[in-house]
Amino acid sequence: MLCDVTTPQDLDDRFRETLAALPAAQRRRDPADPVTDDAPLTGAELLDLFDAQVTSRQLDLAGRWLRSFGEGFYTIGSAGHEANAVVAAALRPTDPALLHYRSGAFYCVRAAQVADAQVADAQVADAPTSDAADVSASAVEPDSAAEPEPAGSAPPAGGFAAYAQAARDVLRGMVASSEDPIAGGRHKVFGRANLAIVPTTSTIASHLPRAVGMGLAVERLRRLDTVGRRAGAGVRVGSGAGAAHAPWPPDAIVVCSFGDASVNHASATAAFNTAGWYDHAGLRIPVLFVCEDNGLGISVRSPEGWVEATLRAKPGIHYLSADGADPVRTYEVAQEAAAWVRRHRRPAVLHLRTVRLMGHAGADAESAYRSAAELAEDLQRDPVAATARQLVDAGVATADELLARYDETGWQVRRLAEEVLSEPKLASAADVVSALAPRRPVRVARAVADSAARASGPGSAAREEAFGGKPPELAGPLTLAQSINAALADGLLDHPQMAVFGEDVAAKGGVYGVTKGLRDRFGAARVFDTLLDETSVLGLGLGAGLAGMLPVPEIQYLAYLHNAEDQLRGEAATMQFFSRGAFRNPMVVRVAGLAYQEGFGGHFHNDNSVAVLRDVPGLVVAVPARPDDAAPMLRTCLASAAVDGSVCVFLEPIALYHTRDLYTEGDGEWLAGYPEPGSWVAGHVPIGRARVYRVGSADDLTIITFGNGVRMSLRAAAVLAEEGVGTRVVDLRWLAPLPVADIIRESSATGRVLVVDETRRSGGVGEGVIAALVDAGYVGAARRVAGVDSFVPLGPAARHVLVSPEAITDGARTLLAR
């Protein structure tokens, strides 16, 4: 029945019917000749692309078959989108790609291209020395004067054998095999480091801001002959231990694909706007956006003409279009698009018209929202059938020959599917989280020690020059803001690939002056202002980290992070998890936040909501309260990002930026000297270790707190000391991971715990602290003083919902009276 055309069996039947109806050509064509007189593809090349498309189609059919008996866990397929095989053929296998979930044919072509390149490399290695030297030279500089506009890589030598490894990769993802080469059974994604395909689980274009960041980073690193690049820290395909990494060539372009419905998403809008904004400003971003337009977002139609109108209207982005049902013309346009981006180093979008066959996924009944006529019309535009029709019309192959290839591929795919069924699955929680966020504290400590040795040794002269002859350890006591500024400068000196960027961080030096002077010392290429969009700021960081840089983006206020949080959760923190460490997103995100600002109120500038950060698996959340903690904690975050690929959020309490006093005005007790490099090792602060202050005997009460709560708790402890109460004030310093061992030890020492949580009673940090105590079997007394479940109001009203020193003192007395 026509209404059932979305079933695998019916799609297969109709493909066979289409082939059977194709008339034979008048004469056979030599496959080495162009498929038509003016075509950019030979018959052999188009036949290879047909094999890739058929492999992708058979993988979709296998996915439905596996699901039918409970062994397949992913049925979103690529049927109808197989024209992206042609796009892959127009690109180079060294062009990094971020692919959406209908990219099976693209993946097959890219995998075969790389396999062919590896064979060619092996042949070069076996060739006589003189010949090998000539070939090697041409490989290093593909753009010679004689070839100013090279085409994309030719399609690989075909037959299913060329695509067998790609098919096995995809099937392993479908059955959640732990031998899946990218995600290891954690998810079904298209990605592999040696293919320069970055895994993304995006369904709504959340990977597009990262692609823009990658393009910006690739171009910056292409232009800057930095020390880090000479040392081998240049643009690389991932940085995971044990992975094979090929550098992206200097003229690489970034390609990212997405569906037409994603055009409407805020993250896509942010990416297009940022690419166009930078292009308008004269900065080059070599990104090719590929919109695969099948007219549907699950069941919601894109209004006729809307996608084209939207894409054409994007300023600064060159528009091209092609019909996926015409593979030769699509190849020609894709070649043109890739060449344009490669030559101009500017963004472009390829609007590729496709269809969606077999519905959105296995459970989707298209007949509920699409007419039989509509479905039949899509079948007429089946890209695999269109390629077959062109091959038969040209006389490159007969319908029977193509059907034989189709059946052979189907049999081989089914055989591979049966093989991967027996492969192991992830067997424990430890297996699942092993790739999430590796922690190697000894290596991080060693990295800090190495930084100290460089700063006091070979880099001492450059350091003194950068600080104008007066390094910060000679500047006297510093505020929190000044200490962070000095630590950022030391980081920029020690990490050539590090960049500091965000809204107002360069010329202005930040709203609170924390980055003041850094641009003048290190230049606009390493300290620069961005447009006002947090999604794009984080996207730039995501792309830069993936490209081999050490990005330190700033989010101006914590409240502004919330509309861009998915860039941290869905993109940054998942990267190692979904690639088994083959790709990393090292990043330290500086965020000004928390409350208690004097004379500058309201919930946008006094946001105390951190639950969204603590909920992200693997994310490191640091909150320095004092100047003498800020510098070593920032050094730890930078080292952890560089060594382990960590994604760190460095949450800076705004109200403490310029605080100088603790107990009385003018006492200077909240200032601290900056440590000279020789003392960095002794003062190293590992992730997840608290700091303990002892007031009086320190035997009666333990106060556990962080941020502004540290200063308030120390003041409360001084009042309690006058009453004969000895207090331990524990500064958590790290909200994720919590310093559980320190919490338990210091709580057990007194048997009375007061948790001072400046966030909120519901969803606040205090809940995690109490839970840690309960889980450890703590049997002493415990009490919380926390902010009210409210946004922070303007002016004096804020005092009614925020924690105060008086509330801490009263809470302590109540606890002691038990």
Image (cartoon, rainbow, N blue to C red):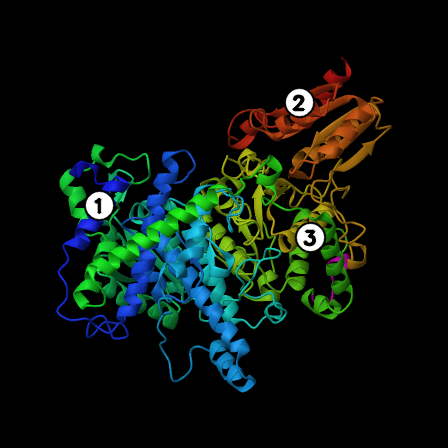
Kindly report the secondary structure that dominates the magenta region of the rendered protein.
loop
Task: List x then y, in percent, for residue 27.
Answer: 15, 71
Q: Amino acid at mark 3?
A: Arg
Say which residue label 1 marks. 13
**Residue 254 seen:** no
Query: Of the residues under marks 2 and 1, which one precedes in the sequence?
Result: 1
Helix, strand or loop at mark 2:
strand
Q: Amino acid at mark 1?
A: Asp
The answer to whether the residues at label 1 and label 3 have Cβ atoms under 8 Å apart is no
Please give left or right for residue 171 compared with residue 690 in the image: left
- Which residue sits furthest top? 818
Please give left or right for residue 784 compared with residue 477 in the image: left
Q: Amino acid at mark 2?
A: Arg
Label 3 vs label 2: CA separation? 32 Å
Label 2 vs label 1: CA separation? 67 Å
Say which residue label 2 marks. 784
Task: List x then y, in percent, for residue 237.
Answer: 52, 61
Please give left or right for residue 480 compared with residue 269 in the image: right
**Residue 2 seen:** yes
Query: Of the residues under marks 1 and 3, which one precedes in the sequence?
Result: 1
The answer to whether the residues at label 2 and label 1 have Cβ atoms under 8 Å apart is no
Task: List x then y, in percent, for residue 402.
Answer: 25, 59
Q: Is residue 642 magenta?
A: no
What are the residue bounds of the magenta stretch? 468-475
Helix, strand or loop at mark 1:
helix
Query: Of the residues under marks 3 and 2, which one precedes in the sequence?
Result: 3
Say which residue label 3 marks. 635
Q: Is residue 471 magenta?
A: yes
Helix, strand or loop at mark 3:
helix
Screen quadrant of the N terminus? top left
